[in-house]
Amino acid sequence: MIDRERIAEFIDEYRVRLALGLGIVLVLLLFVFFAGLISNASSRDDERRVDEEKALLSVSPEELFLPEEPFPLPGIQQFRTTPKVWSSDEAKLWYNTPDTEMLDGVREPARRQIDDLLESVP
């Protein structure tokens, strides 16, 4: 399986090259490590700068929301009292029975809208 003698001969023969290769790999790993640290530190500075810009552009809640009303609003204001029984003159004053002319005036625009809607359906 593993020939220990061949491995020992390989290490003895290429000792300088192996040490140089491991040193280069170690230097590369350290370079990547420090580059990551520097990049992380600069990204923290960027985040801090962005947070400061957001703080400058933000609006305080006191400026955004309207203050409370200085005077309380009154409750329901009744403008008239409703009688329990209406006379026929009062009923004629407040209620009109729709005639065919009034209904036609309402029916025609409604029919036009319905037709337009139905024509637009695929």
Image (cartoon, rainbow, N blue to C red):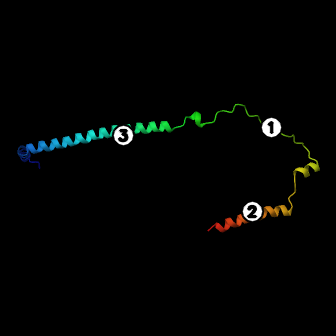
- Disc on the earlier residue, 3 or 1: 3
Residue sitting at x 74%, y 65%: 111
Residue sitting at x 70%, y 31%: 70
Which residue is the site of mark 3?
43
Indicate left or right for 42 with 9 as reference: right
Which residue is the site of mark 1?
77
Answer above or below: position of 117 versus 5.
below
Answer above or below: position of 94 versus 74.
below
Q: 10 Å neighbourhood of mark 2: few (<14), some, or many (≥20)?
A: few
Tell me the CA gap for discs 3 and 2: 63 Å
Quarter location, residue 59: top right
Residue sitting at x 70%, y 67%: 115
Q: 10 Å neighbourhood of mark 1: few (<14), some, or many (≥20)?
A: few
Tell me the CA gap for discs 1 and 2: 36 Å
Q: Position of residue 110 (x, y in %)?
A: 74, 62
Camera-near label (3 vs 2) is: 3
Indicate left or right for 13 with 62 as reference: left
Pick the residue in front: 85 or 108: 108
Q: Where is residue 50 in the image (x, y as percent from the top left)?
A: 43, 39
Q: Which amino acid does label 2 sit on?
A: Ala
Label 2's element?
Answer: helix
Q: How many marks?
A: 3
Q: Position of residue 33 (x, y in %)?
A: 26, 40
Quarter location, residue 67: top right
Q: Where is residue 86 in the image (x, y as percent from the top left)?
A: 92, 46
Which residue is the site of mark 2?
110
- Disc on the earlier residue, 1 or 2: 1
Q: Quadrant of the C terminus?
A: bottom right
Tell me the CA gap for discs 3 and 1: 62 Å
Q: What residue type is labelled 3?
A: Ser
